[in-house]
């Protein structure tokens, strides 16, 4: 007999990429989500890395394979292999560093060159714990997201604000997309 847990049993594996300028907190968002860890001195290691995290949606276990640039972005050399097959993307900036917000359009262009419009995109303003040195108003993030058709959230990998919520929302939206197509 087949195991009971085969019932209704499609397996979902969604590739999601993290993009954005160096030092905005991509690696820490991922380590906070995957391992509930934060690292103050995270050094960018070179080479692509990903972590697989199981998210439960509507009673289904969905594997989110989340890719981290691991430092490639410093050399403006994020490869097409990095983007290949991605069905979700988090475009991250640092709310205390305006230049990282200004770069968002460039990241969106690059993403658009590699992924089709069905890719779920979320704009993420990270480091929202740094309210005292905020350089990008929350309204600016919201406005840009609306203009570009992105989901939007401010997060803090340091104090965990919205980290799980952001990743899970992206996974849910991807799942909704896929199940709509299957109808
Ligand atoms: P990446 O280059 O985008 O992967 O950024 P990292 O995750 O390596 O983080 C860069 C620096 O920002 C590190 O010193 C982190 O400790 C710090 N950092 C990351 N996320 C946060 C956050 O939410 N709040 C604060 N205050 N610092 C953060
Ligand atoms: Mg990194």
Image (cartoon, rainbow, N blue to C red):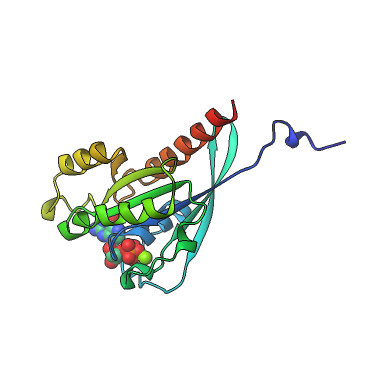
Is residue 63 or residue 99 the one in the foreground?
99
Q: Position of residue 78 (x, y in %)?
A: 39, 66
User: In this rendering, does residue 69 appear at all?
Assistant: yes
The answer to whether residue 35 is left or right of residue 157 is right
Q: Position of residue 157 (x, y in %)?
A: 33, 54
Q: Position of residue 103 (x, y in %)?
A: 23, 57
Specify the farthest residue to the front: 113
Locate the C terminus by quadrant. Answer: top right
Locate the N terminus by quadrant. Answer: top right
Is residue 14 or residue 106 the one in the foreground?
106
Above/below status of 105 relative to 2? below
User: In this rendering, does residue 157 appear at all?
Assistant: no
Which corner quadrant of the figure contains ligand 2?
bottom left
Q: Quadrant of residue 7?
A: top right
Q: Position of residue 104 (x, y in %)?
A: 25, 53
Above/below status of 83 relative to 183? below
Q: Write the residue at 28% across / 60% down.
A: 24
Q: Write the residue at 21% across / 42% down.
A: 144
The answer to whether residue 94 is left or right of residue 85 is left
Above/below status of 101 relative to 164? below
């Amino acid at each position: 007999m087949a195991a009971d847990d085969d019932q209704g049993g499609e397996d979902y594996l969604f590739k999601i990429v993290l993009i954005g300028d160096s030092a905005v907190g991509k690696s820490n968002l991922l380590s906070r989500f995957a391992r509930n860890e934060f690292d103050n001195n995270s050094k960018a290691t070179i080479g692509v890395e990903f972590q697989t995290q199981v998210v439960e949606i509507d009673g289904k276990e969905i594997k989110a394979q989340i890719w981290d640039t691991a430092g490639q972005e410093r050399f403006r050399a994020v490869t097409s292999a990095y983007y290949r097959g991605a069905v979700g993307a988090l475009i991250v900036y640092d709310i205390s560093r305006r230049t990282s917000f200004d770069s968002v359009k460039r990241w969106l262009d690059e993403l658009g060159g590699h992924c089709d419009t069905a890719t779920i995109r979320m704009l993420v303003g990270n480091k929202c714990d740094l309210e005292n040195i905020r350089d990008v108003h929350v309204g600016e993030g919201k406005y840009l997201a609306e203009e570009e058709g992105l989901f939007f959230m401010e997060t803090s990998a340091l104090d965990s604000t919205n980290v799980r919520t952001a990743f899970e929302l992206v996974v849910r939206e991807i799942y909704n997309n896929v199940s709509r197509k299957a109808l």
